[in-house]
Amino acid sequence: MLDLKCKKCRRAGEKLFLKGERCFTPKCALVKKSYPPGVHGRAGQRKRRLSEYGLQLREKQKLKFMYGLREKQFSNYVAKSIARKIESGRVLSEFLESRLDNAVFRCGFAPSRTIARQIISHGHILVNNRKVNIPSYGVKLEDIIKLRPQSLNKGIFSNLDLFLKKRETPAWLTVDKSKKECKILTKPSNEAFSGININAIIEFYSR
């Protein structure tokens, strides 16, 4: 699984941070092999001019891989964003960032979105003091996300305090590190989309 995720980053040509802490270390596959995977990877390192379709496809794949979504899930989010008929890119960022698995990752309770999905599915997360085990659940303003107290002694959270000290959270949420509690302050910003051509993605699905 590690190789598969690292190959996605190498294919995209940039870090998508799919392996949590490992992505920030020299062990990152993109640091070791900064060229695409496959037998022709090094040759493919030479810059090739992408067609408009190729550019749109690449940007779509990057964003889909980043959030760990299947094509149907991702295309549904894009379709709902386009249906709003205004600032589709901003709406798409709000849909993706408001997913519970992403919020759990952003507030530092999990080192990656993959792990966030696991701990949600296993019943370790409460939203407004109610257990929610659906990773795609959409969080809203004033929602409070916290770790279930009974789960804190689980091995998966053994290094949580150390991890939270190093973690920087986005401005749209705030974290009480002592209570292991996170509150949604505002709508998510699209700062997470820096480096991604969101308009190209919208155009890809508007064909």
Image: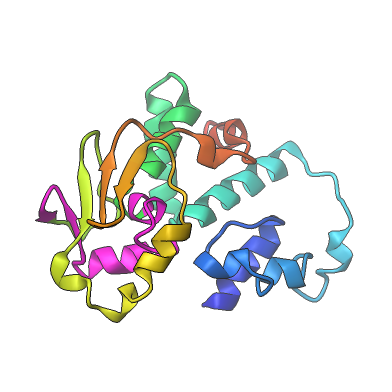
Q: How many marks?
A: 0
Can the viewer see residue 65?
yes
Q: Position of residue 138 (x, y in %)?
A: 27, 43
The answer to which quarter of the image holds residue 111 is: bottom left
Q: Residue at x 40, y 51 (%)?
A: 106
User: Which colouring convention does the figure follow?
Assistant: rainbow
Does the magenta portion include 117? yes
Horizontal and vertical percent for residue 73?
Answer: 38, 50
Q: Nearer the viewer, residue 125 or 57?
A: 125
Where residue 107 sits: x, y (%)? 37, 51
Q: Kindly give the residue lying farthest to the bottom in the view shown.
A: 155
The residue range painted magenta reads 102-130
Look at the picture and state if 92 lies above or below 150: above
Front-most of residues 50 and 168 = 168
Q: Is 137 in front, or is 80?
A: 137
Query: What residue is rendered at 23% in x and 50% in y?
Result: 145
Residue drawn where x is 33% and y is 55% of the image: 104
Image quarter where the C terminus lies is top right
Using the rendered view, name the quadrant where residue 33 is placed.
bottom right
Residue 79 in view in this figure: no
Q: Is residue 6 left or right of residue 84?
A: right
Q: Position of residue 18 (x, y in %)?
A: 53, 63
Residue lying furthest top = 86
Residue drawn at the location 43% of the way across and 18% of the way down: 86
Does residue 85 appear left or right of residue 195 in this picture? left
Please say if 109 is above or below 83.
below
Q: Nearer the viewer, residue 115 or 74?
A: 115
Q: Is residue 184 above or below residue 66?
A: above
Based on the picture, tell me whether residue 182 belongs to the magenta stretch.
no
Judge whether 99 appears above or below 68 on screen.
above
